[in-house]
Amino acid sequence: IYDTSGYRPLVTQLTNYKSPLQNNDYKFVAIFFAANFLLLDGGRPGGKSSNSIIKMIMRLALDYDYCHSHLKELLSAVQEGFIQWTYPVTSLELEEIYAVWESENQKYLQTKRNYGKVFNKALKKGLYNNDPVLFSNTLKDTYGVPLNYTLQNLLDMGLINSKSYNDC
């Protein structure tokens, strides 16, 4: 994972999509490669131990809009990167991993829809007490949605300002 030469095909794929790359794009490359490395090693997203870490990493990657619409191209770039590391990935393995990504994407989209309802109910019940981190962690523990998603909702609703958002 630390040999970044394998990242080059994925960076090229992103560069073809938009140029110049932003700092978050490089973060995405690292997250996406880490998730695929764990998937190729036999890990699967789930609710227990290391599987929950894989799920969290995949959901961080799925928060990037580009990931949704270009998943097959991104996985092809990952395959090329792993080949450069002499870690061959077969087309069958790639299809299996694509199916895992698609499944997790659907689960995550449903989670976000459910989360939005719970988020609004929690606000109506007065559970938000001007502590965005505590509120976010309460909802994250229940729904597995990353902290930045809750913070973005609070920011969009005007309940926190951009300084509070950045401080979290």
Image (spheres, rainbow, N blue to C red):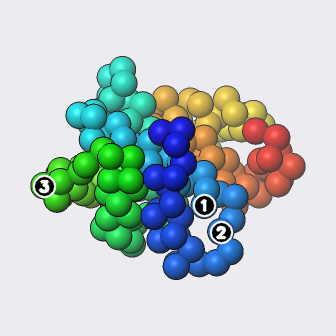
Residue 51, x across and y down, in percent: 33, 29
Name the residue tied to disc 2. Answer: 21
Q: Which residue is at the front of the view, 65 or 156? A: 65
- Name the mark on residue 140: none
Q: Which residue is at the front of the view, 22 or 132? A: 22
The image quadrant of residue 49 is: top left
Q: Residue furthest left?
A: 92
Indicate the amino acid at tag 2. Leu
How far is disc 1 from disc 3 in space, using C-alphas? 28 Å
Indicate the amino acid at tag 3. Leu
Q: Work out whether mark 2 precedes mark 3 in sequence or the reverse, and give the earlier one.
A: 2
At 83% from the left and 53% from the top, the residue drawn is 161
How packed mark 1 is, by other alpha carbons closer than 10 Å (few <14, some 14-19, many 20 or more), is some
The reply, left or right, for residue 106 in relation to residue 7 is: left
SS of the residue under disc 1: helix
Q: Work out whether mark 1 precedes mark 3 in sequence or the reverse, and give the earlier one.
A: 1
Q: Which residue is at the front of the view, 89 or 28? A: 89
How far is disc 2 from disc 3 in space, using C-alphas? 31 Å
Query: Can residue 36 be seen in the rendering of this structure?
Result: no
Name the residue tied to disc 3. Answer: 92
Residue 39, x across and y down, in percent: 29, 40
The image quadrant of residue 37 is: top left
Name the residue tied to disc 1. Answer: 25
At 60% from the left and 61% from the top, the residue drawn is 25
Above or below 167: residue 48: above
